[in-house]
């Protein structure tokens, strides 16, 4: 029997009355498996700090699985806040998950979808980001769903990623504003984060807004400022700001941390428990390719956490792990599922001790780990394995 015949025969078994064993339920997580902690209190305080700085409503960007914290986890914490106008994601799956979880505030979907998905988007009252001439599809989706479809038009003022070019945007926006069953909810753009060129982008965006007003088109809310922009362009807050990383309490650039512009507290942590402790003799090695060779009697500890969980490989080049009250250097290399740390000449940790890769404590903040090893703070959160358990704390 070849593979194709085998698959066909097994697929037919239930129809023949043959009982097929069900797959066992997934085993619970081991207590040694790494986990992610999401601090609800810090999320709330960061949102408050952003609003205090900007003085306008917040469209909270919770894309990419809530920057690693879990998109629904973050939405449930932020939605009740008065300063949160709505939530923004990039994947349709995330937008639908928010609605399935009972999130009712506006959800802006900033990623592309197929034409046939527009009906479900309208039915679920998800706001859609558009930047191509698709008014006909929007009208049909609104009619088929029986609901008004809200759209934000994305304008490219120089980033060159997505968006209708600013010089061609007026007729596109006008068509959306006049479409049947469609409401123009806003017009948006994204800065390049080149401080000098950003000013030109803002000038272009303001000029477009003035033209829209001049021809009698209500643009809805104007928004452009991301977390990065909060620290550079106080005149770009417009009607609403669109931060992501700042809400999670992480500074996008090291220099922003000491700028005094806003005080942020990390709201996400990666933790594990020590799985193994051993003493190396002089000349013993640890890690692939003997990445670490002991020059003296030294204790090491192995953590069941690796780059498959989201800890970047580069963390072995200067990163440190907090166990108890001390920080210990990562040695050898970060493998898929293991990280080794040097403890020192004395056995100061035990199997089962909690180990923190990063959290909200000075010295082990995401910015601290990133700076120590040359990683990006975005790599530390957005690449966290979605299969890791998330625990909401500080509620």
Image (cartoon, helix red, strand yellow):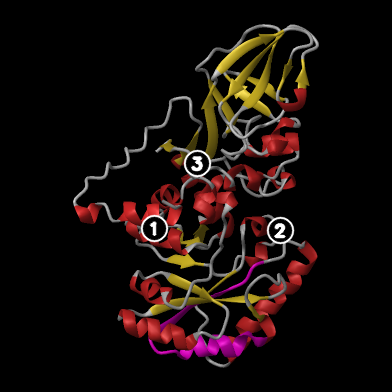
User: Could you tell me if residue 80 is visible in this image?
Assistant: no
Q: Residue at x 44, y 52 (%)?
A: 3
Question: Where residue 371 is drawn, which disc sits there?
Answer: none
The span shown in magenta is 168-190
Question: Where residue 98 is drawn, which disc sits there?
Answer: 1
Please tell me whether mark 1 sits on a helix, a strand or a loop.
Answer: helix
Q: Position of residue 149 (x, y in %)?
A: 40, 78
Q: Residue at x 33, y 54 (%)?
A: 9
Q: Earlier in the sequence, mark 1 or mark 3?
A: 3
Q: Nearer the viewer, residue 142 or 365?
A: 142
Q: Earlier in the sequence, mark 2 or mark 1?
A: 1
Residue denoted by label 3: 42
Please tell me whether mark 3 sits on a helix, a strand or a loop.
Answer: helix
Q: Nearer the viewer, residue 88 or 1?
A: 1
User: Could you tell me if residue 167 is visible in this image?
Assistant: yes
- Local crowd size for mark 1, using a 10 Å CA cut-off: few (<14), some (14–19), many (≥20): many
Q: Position of residue 188 (x, y in %)?
A: 58, 73
- The span from disc 1 to disc 3 (Cα, nearest Å) is 21 Å
Q: Earlier in the sequence, mark 2 or mark 3?
A: 3
- The span from disc 2 to disc 1 (Cα, nearest Å) is 31 Å
Q: Residue at x 65, y 23 (%)?
A: 340
Q: Position of residue 364 (x, y in %)?
A: 63, 31
Q: Nearer the viewer, residue 320 or 260?
A: 320
In the image, residue 188 lies in the stretch drawn in magenta: yes
Q: Nearer the viewer, mark 1 or mark 3?
A: 1
Residue denoted by label 2: 232
- The span from disc 2 to disc 3 (Cα, nearest Å) is 23 Å
Query: Disc 2 vs disc 3: Cβ atoms closer than 8 Å?
Result: no
Q: Nearer the viewer, mark 2 or mark 1?
A: 1
């Amino acid at each position: 029997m070849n593979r194709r015949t085998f698959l066909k025969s097994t697929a037919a078994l239930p129809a023949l009355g043959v009982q097929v064993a069900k797959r066992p339920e997934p085993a619970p997580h081991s207590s040694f498996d790494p986990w992610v902690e999401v601090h609800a209190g810090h999320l709330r305080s960061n949102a408050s700090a952003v609003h205090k700085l900007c003085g306008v409503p917040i469209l909270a960007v919770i894309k990419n699985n809530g920057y690693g914290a879990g998109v629904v986890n973050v939405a449930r914490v932020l939605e009740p806040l008065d300063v949160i106008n709505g939530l923004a994601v990039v994947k349709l799956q995330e937008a639908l998950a928010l609605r399935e979880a009972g999130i009712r505030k506006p959800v802006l979907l900033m990623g592309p979808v197929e034409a046939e998905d527009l009906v479900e988007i309208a039915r679920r009252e998800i706001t859609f980001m558009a930047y191509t001439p698709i008014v006909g599809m929007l009208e049909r989706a609104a009619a088929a769903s029986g609901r008004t479809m809200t759209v934000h038009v994305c304008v490219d003022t120089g980033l060159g990623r997505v968006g209708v070019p600013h010089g061609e945007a007026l007729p596109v926006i006008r068509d959306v504003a006049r479409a049947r069953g469609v409401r123009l909810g806003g017009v948006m753009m994204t800065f390049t984060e080149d401080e000098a060129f950003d000013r030109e982008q803002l000038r272009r965006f303001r000029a477009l807004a003035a033209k829209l007003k001049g021809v009698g088109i209500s643009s809805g809310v104007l928004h452009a400022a991301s977390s990065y922009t909060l620290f550079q362009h106080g005149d770009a807050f417009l009607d609403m700001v669109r931060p992501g990383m700042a809400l999670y309490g992480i500074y996008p650039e090291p220099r922003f941390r000491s700028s005094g512009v806003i005080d942020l507290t990390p709201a996400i942590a990666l933790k594990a428990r020590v799985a193994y402790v051993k003493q190396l003799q002089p000349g013993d090695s640890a890690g692939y390719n003997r990445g670490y060779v002991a020059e003296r009697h030294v204790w090491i500890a192995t953590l069941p956490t690796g780059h498959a969980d989201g800890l970047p490989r580069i963390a072995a080049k200067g990163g440190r792990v907090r166990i108890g009250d001390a920080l210990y250097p990562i040695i050898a290399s970060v493998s898929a599922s293991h990280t080794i740390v040097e403890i020192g000449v004395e056995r100061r940790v035990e199997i089962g001790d909690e180990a923190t890769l990063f959290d909200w404590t000075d010295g082990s903040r995401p910015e601290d780990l990133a700076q120590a090893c040359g990683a990006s703070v975005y790599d530390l959160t957005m690449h966290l394995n979605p299969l890791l358990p998330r625990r909401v704390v500080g509620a």
